[in-house]
Image (cartoon, coloured by chain):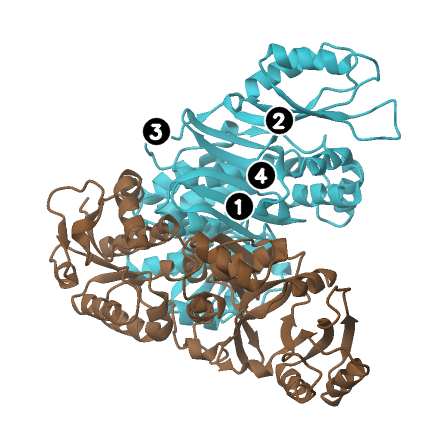
Chain colours: A cyan, B brown
Amino acid sequence: MQEVNVGLIGLGNVGMGTLSILTENADQIELKLGFPLRVKALCSPSIAGKRLPTLPAGVVRTTNWREVVEHPEVDIVAELVGGTTVAREIIESAISHKKSVVTANKELMALCGAEIWDRAISSGINLAMEASVAGGIPIHTVLREGISGDRVTTLYGILNGTSNYILTEIEKHGSSFDDVLKEAQRLGYAEADPSADVDGYDARSKLAILAALAFGEKITPSDIYTEGIRRILPIDFDYAHQLGHTIRMVCSARQTPEGLILSVRPALIPQSTILASVQGAYNAVWVRGKYGADTFYYGRGAGSAPTGVAVVSDLMRVAREIRAGSPERVSPFAHERLGEYKPIPVTLQHSAYYLRFRVEDRPGIIATLSRVLADQQISLEAVLQLPTDNWRDRPFVITVEPASEQAIREALAEMSTNNFLVEPPLAMPMEKSL
Amino acid sequence: MQEVNVGLIGLGNVGMGTLSILTENADQIELKLGFPLRVKALCSPSIAGKRLPTLPAGVVRTTNWREVVEHPEVDIVAELVGGTTVAREIIESAISHKKSVVTANKELMALCGAEIWDRAISSGINLAMEASVAGGIPIHTVLREGISGDRVTTLYGILNGTSNYILTEIEKHGSSFDDVLKEAQRLGYAEADPSADVDGYDARSKLAILAALAFGEKITPSDIYTEGIRRILPIDFDYAHQLGHTIRMVCSARQTPEGLILSVRPALIPQSTILASVQGAYNAVWVRGKYGADTFYYGRGAGSAPTGVAVVSDLMRVAREIRAGSPERVSPFAHERLGEYKPIPVTLQHSAYYLRFRVEDRPGIIATLSRVLADQQISLEAVLQLPTDNWRDRPFVITVEPASEQAIREALAEMSTNNFLVEPPLAMPMEKSL
């Protein structure tokens, strides 16, 4: 049967992974599809210096992406460049040339995925982006097809491997954030500038895409409250464990009667939940549906080969659609829906909270803090103080019963006027059950 | 846009779950598809006594399934009857009438899925069976599309909720198999005749389907070595924990250089692996691919609504294909492949093993058993004996380094000639890492 031809633009980590799977696994891919999926053109600014697998004669090698997009035999363009400038030009040009597109670009799809989808649909081509979130986990396929009959109510994710690695290392070894970060940088698990990972911006883009898919609503990164993990201390894990919990950077999208509440932030989750078993650089997504109850998906969040599998699987699906002459008819992404899922501010969230204080030791502190909480109608649940060697700086913890984030924030602001605080209190939501 | 019409045959647990999702969630389903998915006909032997949701005028209610299959407006037939007799007739009749089929029937699809698929393909209709295995987990979609670019090398599953519930209850409470089974029967978690669940036959059918999907090979239940959980004692969990492991009924399909080894049996798995965190009636599937490394999928194995989600999601996919005029071109199931995945006997498996003995206390037992193992070239790893109150019947454990199942079986047969054994030894494979 007639082949479908692919042009790969970008031969970094993901591009090289994709290329090697397409060549090494070509026999199985052809058997699964019923026709061959061929690499027809490759583009990279450093194409001359790349160690490429053996390729059949006639494969275009170029430094100019337009040669790939405009190649008459290329049916699908894989945009594996990343970023939001050239990548956007490539995708838009491919759509104008009526070429289907597979992309791994989380940043671009989080920022303007809905818009790009609209253009793709009106041009009658396919667009696929499994690799843009949690590379090794086929979560797009699951949301788009696997559980499409369900009505998602909540989605939780651990979507940044670096920050999960750092948190689980702090948990295991009791080392400080700074020490673990340095070690992670030395091992190549964290970038020289770690901000995208540890401050939550990378996870935020991913949550924007997943929440859009899960709820069919237009969601952009700015809809998502985001807080990083720099302030987490080893003692926070000790307190969390005492409470039967652990700490993860949780990406969460929750339907409430008022709308959708979205956040990326460190949170306490029960140790007994399967989400708590996600260690190291792994990613996971946990979905609650109205009908299907809870499902959970786990795998590598990144890496050349796992992300390459996502790109190749997308290429296969799009190739099948091309052969069958059937582009996707409805965007799975940012499609106008029932209006039930408008993002609302995180301050409307109700949750139990973990509040951790570092104070100058003096009498009456608990009394003062309790009074501030009571003024906000927040009920105290427990006060915990683990023994410590350092009597000058004794972190202690107050947990409170479910309250609005707004009330918590007002209480924390009021508390901060007291000069016994060594630093502003740290507040984390505390999930009672998952 | 023009609607697609569904006929449901069978209104038991799964059928009623499907019907209520199709009616309650109709608005979202229509938005996701871009056209309505309508229930057109319902069939059940007890249709008159069913409490049905409010349905539009003109929905056929019948006790005769042929009226559904032959209804000119029905585009997709959902076979939710189960079993291998009438169900097969229904599916074959639907295929002859060029109607696409969605089925939840694990038994039938395990027995003759490949054959049914061949008929479906040559008739140009779609066949979908997500609900046949691990109802709440969209594992078919994952294997067929989500990770289709990968080359699966190993698949592990916990595919029977009842036996997993029983094992985890024995683990938690130290109760005997018989007591836990009785309690499970009282609670409705286990059938009056529990054999299909606790002897592994239900899990075997499910593994046959998943392995066929994952490896693209014709696999039937008789290719799968199957052993139940009746012999597991609470003390086996104590020994397993001492070894850093736990016990689960593991469905496994593994590629070896000689072929595919398939089994359903209790096995020791490391407590640190995410598979060990599967508690109670949940199901899980763990897949290792050559490229994508490990992914893990978890959810409800059964239940009216979770299985209903699987059926409805299949109906949506098939409806989309019908509207796009594109039946599946290649069977995802039991397709002739590269010949690398022929099932071979479990006796060719190499693994570490846990061997548990119940003996009459007398001197020289360990010496005798060690000699038998040495005769088979099996290296002893550890001998464990936990203290017990019952000195007449002291179960103890020998773990051995990786050996062939054939050698283990020969050693066990040789050991059984010794009259100090109270019962035949219990052998379980011991996975060192997952």
Quarter holding residue B291: bottom right
The answer to whether dots 2 and 3 both sit on one chain is yes
Circle 4 SS class: helix
Q: Return the disc, 4 or 1, that comes first in the chain's sequence.
A: 4
Q: Amino acid at mark 4?
A: Ala
Distance Cα–Cα, label 4 vs label 2? 22 Å
Task: Measure how far apart labels 3 and 4 are at the Cα level.
Answer: 25 Å
Label 2, label 3: how far apart the Cα atoms are: 29 Å
Circle 2 is placed at which residue position?
Answer: A353
- Chain of the residue where label 3 is placed in the rendered structure: A
* Residue at point 77%, 69% (across, down): B384
Q: Which residue is mark 3?
A: A339
Which comes before the other along the chain, label 2 or label 1?
A: 1
Q: Which subunit holds the residue at mark 2?
A: A
Answer whether residue B171 is visible to the viewer in this image. Answer: yes
Tell me where residue A328 appears, x and y as whole percent: 32, 49
Q: Is residue B427 above or below residue B184?
A: below
Query: Which amino acid does the dot numbered 1 rest on?
Result: Val
Q: Secondary structure at mark 1?
A: strand
Horizontal side of residue A109 vs A228, given as left or right: left
For the residues carrying marks 3 and 4, which lies nearer the camera in this image? Answer: 3
Quadrant for the C terminus of chain B, please: bottom right
Residue B220 spot, x, y in % from top left: 41, 76
Callout 3 amino acid: Gly
Mark identifier at residue A203:
4
Chain identifier of the residue bearing label 4 in the image: A
Residue at the spot of label 1: A285
